[in-house]
Image: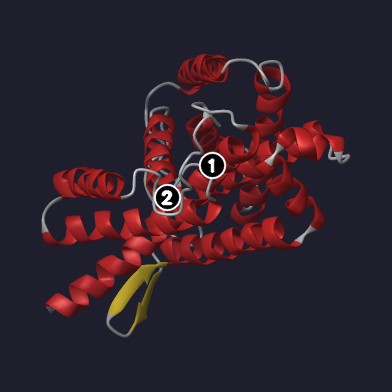
Amino acid sequence: MGTFSVIFQQFINGLTIGGVYAMVAVGLTLVFGILRQMNWAHGELYMLAGYALVITYTMMNVPYYVAVILTVLMVAFVGLLYEWLVFRPVRGKPFVNAIVCSLGVSIFVWNIVLALFGGTPYKLATPLTGKIMRLGLFSISGQRLMTLVVGVMIIGAVYYWIQKTRAGRAMRAVEQDGEAARLMGVNINRIAEVTFAIGGGLAGLAGALVGPIFVIEPRVGAWAVGKAFAVVVMGGMGSVMGSIFAGFTLGVIESLAIGFLATQYRDLIAYLMIIVILWIRPQGLFGRIAQKGA
């Protein structure tokens, strides 16, 4: 395989994993940008999606594509529970309260899953496992192709919904000035519920699509939230477009590092890139400079 073919192949692989990063990071940045709350337990939504797929698809023998839909709905509901039970009580309180509460939720969920399922990784085989699509210079597995296509479609749909619908405009109004939006009749609690449900659904979809590609085990939540925070910081805190762009960029850079160096250099190259970007633009690629006194 020539150098150009390797670059193209790794670029396609990078887009696949980048789409997963973007799906998880968009949910995280929505919660921060609109509600100004930091959710360290967001990675556990991704992890729970994997185990929801294990239960529905493996243990209950639900068809895979139906199991994916059920997983998204279940994890979106868990996102709602986050809002109702954890984040609503601390909304308007000091910033650190949400951080501490979400860290507690993360540890609690992690240990519950560990107690119920143990630490042994699950490897799922779906109807797409083993199917390889060859398209000219590159090939891609059926599962990765579905992850890429569905991920791009859903991310595009969510972005369109935020920009063009009445509910999306209400969310952006809360992001710009929550108190003014409330005085104009925007229901802040409803916006919070929608935001957490969308974030949970996106994390659930990412976990259900990429879980069969890798393995499902309790520690993947920490991996997911680590990548998501890196993407959110690189793209600009609270910027949906920034998270989308940064997610795909990080995925491609990591994939190229694996293709031309070695797997162990993947994170090194990626985080060096983030350091350079933040050195040049401290607010992130699409972030806005904080106003003095804001």
| Rendering coords of residue 197 (x, y %) | 69, 39
Residue at the spot 48% in from the left edge and 47% down from the top edge? 288
Query: Is 176 or 63 nearer to us in this picture?
Result: 176
Q: Residue at x 56, y 32 (%)?
A: 294
Q: Nearer the viewer, residue 231 or 201?
A: 231
Mark 2 and mark 1 lie on one chain; the one further toward the N terminus is 1
- Distance (Cα) linking label 2 and label 1: 10 Å
For this orientation, the residue located farthest to the bottom is 136
Q: How is the image coloured?
A: secondary structure
For residue 83, say whether it is visible. yes
Q: Quadrant of the N terminus?
A: bottom left
Instruction: Give the numbered dot on residue 241.
Output: none
Quarter of image, res 90:
top right
Horizontal side of 287 relative to 6 (left or right) equals: right
Determine whether the residue tagged by mark 1 lies in a helix, strand or loop.
Answer: helix
Q: Which residue is pictured at 39% across the width and 30% down the height?
A: 222
Q: Are marks 2 and 1 in contact (CB under 8 Å)?
A: yes
Give the amino acid type for the residue marked by disc 1 in the picture.
Thr
Determine which residue is flagged by label 1: 29
Where is residue 191, by image quadrant? Answer: top right
Q: Residue furthest right?
A: 185
Residue behind mark 2: 235
